[in-house]
Image: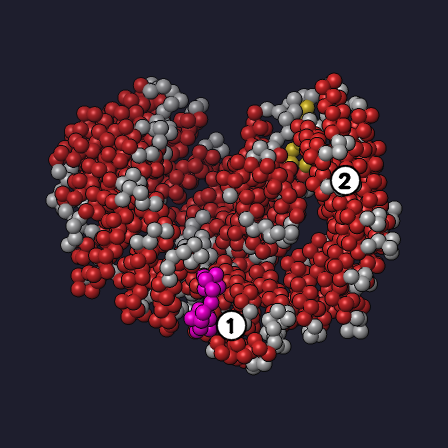
Amino acid sequence: MAPGKVYLLNSLTEKMQSPDSDFRYMALNDLANEIAQDQAIFGSDETIEAKVLNQVLKLVEDKISEVKNQAVKCLGQLIKIVRENQMNIIVDKLIEYSGGKDEELRDIAGLALKTVTTELPQDAKITQKACAKLTPKLLLQLKNPSTPPETAIDTLSILSILATRFAPYLADLDQPPLDILSPLLNHPRPAVRKRVILTLAQFLPPSSPRAVTTLLKSLPPLLAASATLDQQRTTVQLLGAIARYAPNKLESTLNEIVPGIINAAGRGDAELSEGALQALETIVLKCPTEVTPFVAPIITVGSELIKYDPNYAGDDDDDEEMNDADEDEDEELQDEYSDDEDTSYKVRRSATKLLSAVISTRPALLVTFLRSVSPVLISRFGDREESVRLEVWSTYGVLLKQIEVYGGSPQTREASGLKRKREDSNVESRSPSSTDEETPYSLLRGQAPTFVKTLLKQLQAKIPPPALQAGISLLHSFLTVLPGSMAASSSTVLSIVSSVLAQPTTTTTSTLHTTTLTFVARFFSTHQPATFTASLPNLLPRLLTSAGDKHPRIASESFRVFSALLNALKPIGVSTGAGWVESVYDEVVRRLERTDTDADVRARAEECLADLWLCATDVVRRLSGKEWEALMKGARTEGAVQVIERVAKEVVISDKWVGECIEWVCGVLRKSGRGGRVDAFKCLEVLLRGYKAGVPHSDAEHIIPHITPYITTSDLSLLAHSLSVLTVLLQLSPKETFEIVERDLLSNIYILACSPLVSGAALDALLSFFYHLVQADGQITTHVIPGLRLTLENTKAGQVSPANVGKCIGAVVRSQNSIAAGAIAEFSKYIQPSSKASEAKTVLSLLTLGEIGRFIDMSPQADIFTNSLEFFLADSEELRSAAAFAVGNIAIGNIHQFLPVIIQQVQSNDEKRLLSLHALKEVVTHCSHGQLEGVAGALWSPLFENSNNSEESTRNVAAACLGKLTTTNPSAYLPQLQARLRDPSPAIRATVVSAIRYTLADTTQSYDDLLSPLIIEFLTLVQDTDLTVKRLALSSLNAAARNKPHLIRDHLVTIMPLLYAETAVRPDLIRIVEMGPWKHKVDDGLEARKSAYETMYTILDTCISKVDLHEFFTHVLRGLSDSADEIKVLCHMMLFRLSQVAPTTVSQRLDDASPDLEESVKGAAVTKDTVKQDLERGAELQRSALRAVAALSKISSPAVSPRFDNFVIQVEKGALGAEFRELL
């Protein structure tokens, strides 16, 4: 140890002995700081360590409280760094103090022991020894009958800390903790019993099976009516604690325990009923699968005890009227008994929470809940105890959320696509459907009048702002699920809204105002104007006042309300709404003109301005027009651009206005960021089409210089938009635009056409540009094609895309068919056998002829087809691919002449078979539906004959063609695919299931009735013994879940177990490959496993209503520990999604997910063999895990998942804390 450290520690020790308490306190404080800065402060000097420690322990007995507390803090730091023998001294001394007769010393010793156990490092060597030393002594202290109750409570608290933090170290104790703790359940002090219940439950996980079984077998008799009331209360509380901390220990005994708890709940004792209901709630949440047989009686007991109110003399049938009595009657009622003595509300609140737990974890029972639970909840909307009333409203909100998310539960076919057509089969329908059978929506609609009437009655009473806000939020949730359901009560609804908005805005009411305005916006957007126009004269002044409020959230929501109102009343004429519309207009302009307007308020005001112009055009047109100047002068250009685009698209103003807007938008292009530029280009295109008298001659010359900088491959999105604007100019102002384009841009665009980077929307825009360029001036055609070809030839090899150039030339020829013959003659000479053209020129010629052949019949030049076919034997892969493209597309131009030749090549020529299949794929892909129907029969057999091929590439091409052909005549071809499902050849089965995958990619529903009965037979190939077939079947299932979920929803009961089976790692598919001195592990089942998890992710999005989320979540947890990072990332994504759609289910099992998430957040371990790719992959996994943890932390409930909560705290404190907080 350095001399300086020795001097420092000796000096601190001396100060600890000072008679001055301030010196003692400061010495302890300095010591704690020194230890925090240097964990090796004692070095190897055991003498000085013992000296310091003994002095700190002496100060635990100090007479001054501040000194004692500081000594405790020092012990928390010292326990991390002292040697084992010193640790033993700490433990022995503190145990001695805690068992002494000095009450004050016992208290400080208890605090010190808690501090020491809390500060022990999780993985240090000393921790295990400390647990082994401390736990038996604490248990021995509890075993001593003379231990004071206060000491026993402290000791139990310390044992709880040990059990929750260091459970693995407590498994091999000499004396089982349960044997010592169990007798304390009969302690005469209730506080001790309450504490021992918690500690006992926390010690179950590390305890031996024998001790656990003995304890659990002793509990059912204590639930019987013959047991004392205290025994029953203690037992139900213990069972609830066990369910919380060790649910897996309880699962095997639920058949005996749950009936006993249910019976205990109905025995009339308030405290016993409350404990029993809380225990049932925890069991429902923690043992979701095992408790299933008891769900019905649990619902029954919850529905009965939610009415438990022995102090209320009213009739149960009139419970909803409880809160309607006059204030005088309430005062009389309060004279009869004191609310302070009435604890029945705790029973009702616990019953409500129990029903909420069942509802939130059992979406399959939505119809049952709406039949039996919903009426009970509605009847309790008026509970006289506010906390119960709010809990009832919250529970009904949970029910509404479940209906919104799981609208097509297993008890209904409401979401079935077989009974009704949906516009988007990718998203599960959540809207009510008209069907005779009971569905969640039909049942809710039937209860809507009672719901609205009962809740509105409560909101009309005098209730505090938080309760009023909760009630209005519930109304909003109801409207979200069942739009337009409050038409009959609209006057009452809007009267309540008006009275809320009439209250002055304060810190306590601002949130209420915001919630109310959000609800009103929803109300206006979901109801017919006739239902609320009579209430507008009273409501509009309140809304206008709110729009001018200084609170930003209130003002922004007010503008949102006016937007909803304007759209609901559209169109608004001068005679019907001039007054209030002008007032809204004035407030919008005022907000836009002010530079200090909040960004959110300004955004909502801009949206409202657009709605004013779209919905009240005649009124706004008469006003000053100051809004456009205010809009364009604002700093937020993105919103202004969107407003101008919306107005220009739907309202005709004037060409002058259009010109001014174009000039302003061009300035935005120059100043904005990337997102603003995208909006500006869209707006510019709309504005150009908005001219009534045509585009002015000067506009092209003004606009083109502003868009020229974006005609580059550095940003393909902006390139696509800039080319689209050029195309619009060529259409609307061809002469002026053409001259500028030819002079300034065309050579650069030729270079773009050759770039392999141009694809997708940018390529489509480029083709449209060339099409309209030629239409603007037909004479340019003779220059464009040579220009494109020469640019390609002059560009370096590897930096060109002949396919793109071919497409551009094809677009030119399509625009001017008159030049087709010349173009064909020019390019065909380079593919003649005698040609000595370069490979690049030949490839371009083949691709161009293919593009032209798609819409020009080349049968008069049949040699072109024949010459193209000969290139199937070329040495160059690029030439062969181009030839297949040319042959297939030329065949489309005259399918009856050329297609038989391709089929013959497929059947008879082994060398040309694969390329001929690629040519057939071009035919099948680009043919019109009518053409394909005519030739499907000729193609079917040759394709299937070549599916039994060992080469996967050949099979894939054949399968793609078969899938496309199946859609042309499904009644004929689906049975043929079905007949080959059991073919002994794996190649045939692989082709069949792959063909089905391509069929499922077609989102039209024209043949769904034919596919539906067969789909399950196709998809059960996930059980196939061949890995390729299995992987393709999983891929097909994924396609079905994404594109046609309605076909598989009713089969998920069969499919999901097969899918889950494929998520397991199969050791028999893992092999070791030796690569020189290294051995590499190869998992042949990885691809199938990854496909299975990808399919689970898709099903979670599209078929959630039919999925058992408890089982689903179990398999997601298993994937978190998979060896493949890709699967871990998929599971992180599913955790993110599950946290949104099933928060209750997920929040109960966060501790199960914690270990694997902790491992992923750590990042990649760096070794001498680590390469850059490993670090990048580890960083991506770390970010993925962090996103999942951030989402899960939002649904974590206090004390439910202590390990996860501790993990989140560590992440926030660690190196990733800043990134984590951003995700929140």
The percent coordinates of residue 948 (x first, y second) are 55, 41
Whether residue 555 appears in magenta in the rendering, the answer is: no
Mark toward the start of the polypeptide (1 vs 2): 2
Q: Is residue 282 left or right of residue 6?
A: left
The percent coordinates of residue 789 (x first, y second) are 28, 24
10 Å neighbourhood of mark 2: few (<14), some, or many (≥20)?
some
Which residue is more in the foreground, 766 or 838? 766
The percent coordinates of residue 194 (x first, y second) are 74, 59
Q: Is residue 331 above or below residue 731?
A: below
Q: Main secondary structure of the magenta part?
A: helix
> Which residue in the structure is indicated by mark 1?
382
> Which residue in the structure is indicated by mark 2?
62
Colouring method of the image:
secondary structure
Q: Is residue 415 above or below residue 702?
A: below
| Amino acid at dot 1 | Gly
* Real-space CA distance between mark 1 and mark 2, rounded to the nearest whole angstrom: 57 Å
Q: Is residue 9 left or right of residue 1032?
A: right
Which residue is more in the foreground, 159 or 948? 159
Q: Residue furthest front?
A: 19
Q: Give, as a single range, the part of the protein colored magenta.
A: 451-469
10 Å neighbourhood of mark 1: few (<14), some, or many (≥20)?
many
| Amino acid at dot 2 | Asp
Whether residue 460 appears in magenta in the rendering, the answer is: yes
Q: Which picture quadrant has residue 797?
A: top left
Callout 1: SS: loop
Q: What residue lies at 51% left-to-right and 43% top-to-bottom?
A: 1224
